[in-house]
Image (spheres, coloured by chain):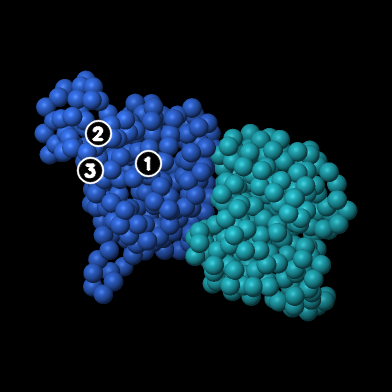
Chain colours: A cyan, B blue
Amino acid sequence: MLAKRIIPCLDVDDGRVVKGVKFEGIKDAGDPVELARRYNEQGADELTFLDIGASYKSRDTLMEVVRQVAREVFIPLCVGGGIRTVDDMRLAMNAGADKVSVCTAALRNPELLTDMARAYGSQCVVLSIDAKRVSGPGEDPRWHAFAKGGREDTGIDAIQWAIDAVRLGAGEILLNSIDADGTGAGYDLELTRLVGAAVPVPVIASGGAGSLDQIVEALLPDGGNADAALVASMLHFGRTTIKEIKTYAEQKGVLVRW
Amino acid sequence: MIGVINYGAGNLGSVMNALARLGLPARFVQGPEELVGRGSGRPRGVAGEGATGEGSASEGTAGAAGSSGSSGARSSGPAYSGIIFPGDGHFATAMEALDRSGYSEAIREWISADRPFLGICIGLQLLFETSEEAPPVQGREIRGLSVIPGTVRKFQGPKVPQIGWNETRGKGRSKLFSSLPDRSFFYYIHSYYVVPDAPDWVAAEADYYGTYCSAVERGALTAVQFHPEKSGALGLELLRRWAEVYHVS
């Protein structure tokens, strides 16, 4: 049986791991290589690095971080943030990434997903969706895909975007709920479940884990039914460990890897 | 020295990183001729060469005996004690690259001489005869390396590819897998799985929309569907044991 994955997410700005609340209010959380090492030892199933610095210098620094991590950590590595072209992807892959995630660039140019899948295979292409609930109370639930780190409403339906993106070449969906991100209010279980049912690829739930219960709910079949959960603040600020998450998940009937 | 075959399929850096971490010397194979033994020390006794020398013969002897002349210039070519055949990619594209470059024949020769060989991911699938990933084109079958009788099928289920860590069980008297502890998870990323005609090829199994073969073993040939180089401590341990069991260094 396939295990559900627990994936620490390291938002990196100019060589430091940072974590914001609702995409704002950034706090420093440490050295990325050091954290990667620690999470690997704790049993992380994969690591995601997101460059949120968005300058060339910040990106080059992140590539050096990935290169260093790849030499000593032997689990899958995903790199995102500021990847706009197949050449950007190549830089990340050459540094040691196993896959890249794209968000805004794919919204602007969906063909990018196809080009990336052609170059490396769709298993290396992760579409990151920043989704925000736009329906009012009492309406049928609707979510839009947002661009530019959650600042721009594209008006595109998030679920339809997931379906289209997979058709174009995305091999995995990283589903980030903006409503919940960094607030500890929990993953958007309804959205996670709907996207998972709509696409034939794994869905990684992201955004807003504030308790062990929320992480486990995102993974359970009658919760979000996600294939993996991305966790950031809870780990970086020492509120929990991978081991604790997995132990708890296992107690609740989730298959995890030890 | 371990030779890692690079035929343009996927990112091989992590395989090199893993071997470096284990202190196992490795390099990319520079071309198929490095596998067929001419002018190099270790790989010899290839069928048809008619070498009469004992196994302990010096490099020079082997080079001279085999010489149809010119290979002398490369007499100090690398002698691989084992070959790793990794990669991701498409069955047909990979076969085309292997056929064009001459690797197909060299790999078959290496394996038929029962030299240590480790295939990873598509490096397992390519050892088979055919694949559902590469259906016949205008009635003409696209053949794999055909070292192992059998075929490669696509998973039938709602989530394909399989991406993630799957529990893997050793089968039979496998040298590498029978001692695998319970609840051993390896990292997989694939849409197709191998189906050997003879069940005794199966060295390990996992479950994804049914039980499938996740490793094969026979003689000095091992091939795995998962990525040991991405499977954490357990994956590194498997690579280390492969090197140990087959005296690859």
Closer to the camera, A1 or B76? B76
Disc 3 crowd, CA 10 A, few/some/many (<14, 14-19, 20+): some
Q: Quadrant of the N terminus of chain B?
A: top left
| Residue A232, x across and y down, in percent | 74, 48
| Residue B110, x across and y down, in percent | 26, 40
Closer to the chain start, of discs 1 and 2, is: 1
Q: Are marks 1 and 2 on the same chain?
A: yes
Residue lying at 73% horizontally and 65% vertically, measured from the top left? A130
Q: Secondary structure at mark 3?
A: helix
**In the picture provided, is A107 more to the left or to the right than B110?**
right
Type of the residue with mark 2: Gly
Residue lying at 16% horizontally and 34% vertically, measured from the top left? B66
Disc 1 crowd, CA 10 A, few/some/many (<14, 14-19, 20+): some
- On the image, numbered disc 3 is attached to which residue? B109
Q: Quadrant of the C terminus of chain B?
A: top left
Closer to the camera, B30 or B47? B30
Q: CA distance from mark 1 to mark 2?
A: 19 Å
Q: CA distance from mark 1 to mark 3?
A: 15 Å
Q: Secondary structure at mark 1?
A: loop
Residue B34 visible in rendering: yes
Residue lying at 35% horizontally and 48% vertically, measured from the top left? B124
Q: Is residue A42 above or below residue A88?
A: above
Disc 2 crowd, CA 10 A, few/some/many (<14, 14-19, 20+): some
Closer to the chain start, of discs 2 and 3, is: 2
Q: Nearer the viewer, mark 1 or mark 2?
A: 2
Q: Nearer the viewer, mark 1 or mark 3?
A: 1
Q: Chain of mark 3?
A: B
Q: Is residue A196 above or below residue B76?
A: below
Q: Which mark is residue B29?
A: 1
Q: CA distance from mark 2 to mark 3?
A: 22 Å
- On the image, numbered disc 2 is attached to which residue? B72
